[in-house]
Image (spheres, rainbow, N blue to C red):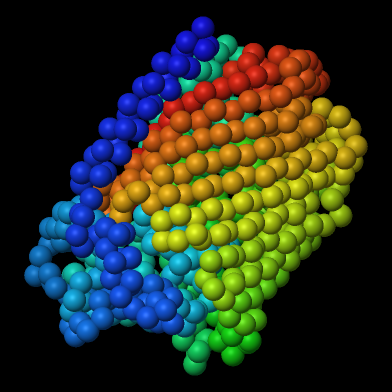
Amino acid sequence: MIVKKSKRLIAWASVLAVALSATIAWSADTTDTSVDAKKTATAKKTADAKKKKDASKYAKGPAGATPAPAPIPYGKKANMYWWQRLNEAFAEQSATQCFVPPKPGDPPAPERRIGPTPFDGPPFPDPDWQIGGGPNVIGDPGALRDAPWPLMQAIYDGPSGKEWYDSRIQFYGWVTVSGNISTSHNTQKSQESNFPEVYDERGNRVENEQDVLYIERMADQNQTDHIDWGFRISLLYGLDYRFMASRGYINDQNLFRANKFSGFDTPMLYFNLYFPQIAQGMSLIIGRIVSMPDIEQQLAPNNLMASHSLVYAFDDYTIWGIWTATKLNKNWVLQLGIASGVDTAPWAYNLHEQGCEPTGSVNFQYIDSGGHDSFYGGINSFNKGNFGFNNLQECIESYTHKFNETIWTTFEFQYMWTNGVATAPTYKVPYEDGFFPTHTGKAWDCGLVNYTCFRIAPNAFFTVRNEWWDDPQGYRSGYSSPYSEHAMGITWFPNKLLMIRPEIRFEHCYKTNGLASSTANYNTSGAPETTYGAYDNGTRTSQLTFAIDATFHF
């Protein structure tokens, strides 16, 4: 029965993927916005100049063009009411493509001390090489105000637009909705039939994933003559709050006790200072950030696919502390930090939380001079390693290779452990941001995930994800087994504001009749017990899912 349903689901997904690909191909501009046009233009340059031209073409525009003076970016509609300006901003940006190469006479983009971005973002989630921490990298001016989302455009167009523009303070956000059709549909013991797949834990339904508002100021980390400052306040409501909660913060009751499927959180709350006089620039961050080294993030636009890998799904989420990122030279960045634990607020010590203790991090980034390779990783969290709320000791390494302007790939390896674990809640560890292991002693997990991306249109790319992950004590997934997961999907921007990501995913746990955690969603015995598999509330070893999400920016 599962095989028949799986075949029908694959056939349906294939039809939709073909239809979507046809739509993308039909809607793509084949003259000004094709990737092939870029290759044709740059091929005319000499071998020595080609590399520089490839890197800077989108930033500087076609050779020989006389740049037009940059238009004044504020006060253009000061005589209109607020709602009129906002309506026109949405209309204008809805008619704009997410990626448009510059035309002759366009004003030049802001120069970057570190050179042009290696990727076009959008459609890719991030235009820079992978690195965590602040919103922009050292050597970047943080010029989001020069390409604002509709909410800020309406503010800039108003009578106080100049003051807002000069302040560099931004308001913007998005709404993400998702849905899935899954072979897991047993909800007798728990709603989370898709688990350990996340974030769509609940099978065969539509979810309000996240409604997000950012309030931020990006420090200008391109200049070298003065100290600058920035901050970010992120406000999130929806299903995904479940994957960023901190012990002792605002969701002890809502999530850890009541297990509610919608809630509010603030995954990023930080202030940062930029010191250009230290090495080639140093950024200091104080507050709460999302875990730094991962390929993926909790925030929907920052991911290559709609769903998350198993490797990412159960590691460090958010951390409170102080971090520095220092650009040592053009190739190397060193990140050092001290935090209050993993997913643990500094004041959780008052709750007798053993996971609340000084926790260090040491990470580095290396970018090769040729512009094709990047290494990033280190020890993301380390302390005494004793049993506590999500007190993970995590080593994580990633490598990214850019083949050309249309194909690139990225790998991430992760190993985590905790010592002296218990198999059920204790007085000092009443909750886990995962599960209580099926064996006492040392609990560990490790895995490797790969994403390979293919640019199929100026406004779209195709992604393949493959991973292997082992959770022998069920500490993270709730079921003791190795896993594999394979997925493919498309990211498509019909316009600048809307992102649509369909995907198909198959995953499998390799142990049958393994031990499930005492706190697994479907285990009511209060102790580790044998169940058939990890999926469909302990009744299956495999799962096939077709999912899609849509993100609308404002």
Q: Residue at x 75, y 34 (%)?
A: 471
Residue 407 spot, x, y in % from top left: 45, 54
Above or below, comparing residue 70 to residue 374 in the picture: below
Q: Residue at x 64, y 75 (%)?
A: 332
Residue 212: tell me if it is visible: no
Above or below, comparing residue 362 to residue 48 in the picture: above
Q: Quadrant of the C terminus?
A: bottom left
Residue 83 spot, x, y in % from top left: 16, 56
Q: Is residue 152 left or right of residue 414?
A: left
Q: Is residue 478 left or right of residue 229?
A: right
Q: Residue at x 55, y 80 (%)?
A: 274
Q: Is residue 213 left or right of residue 436?
A: left
Q: Residue 8 versus residue 502: which sits nearer the camera?
A: 8
Above or below, comparing residue 135 to residue 433 in the picture: below
Q: Residue furthest top?
A: 1
Image quarter of residue 205: top left
Residue 43 spot, x, y in % from top left: 33, 71
Q: Residue at x 78, y 21 (%)?
A: 515
Q: Residue 230 versus residue 494: which sits nearer the camera?
A: 494
Residue 459 spot, x, y in % from top left: 31, 52
What is the count of numbered marks? 0
Q: Residue furthest bottom?
A: 225
Residue 15: tell me if it is visible: yes
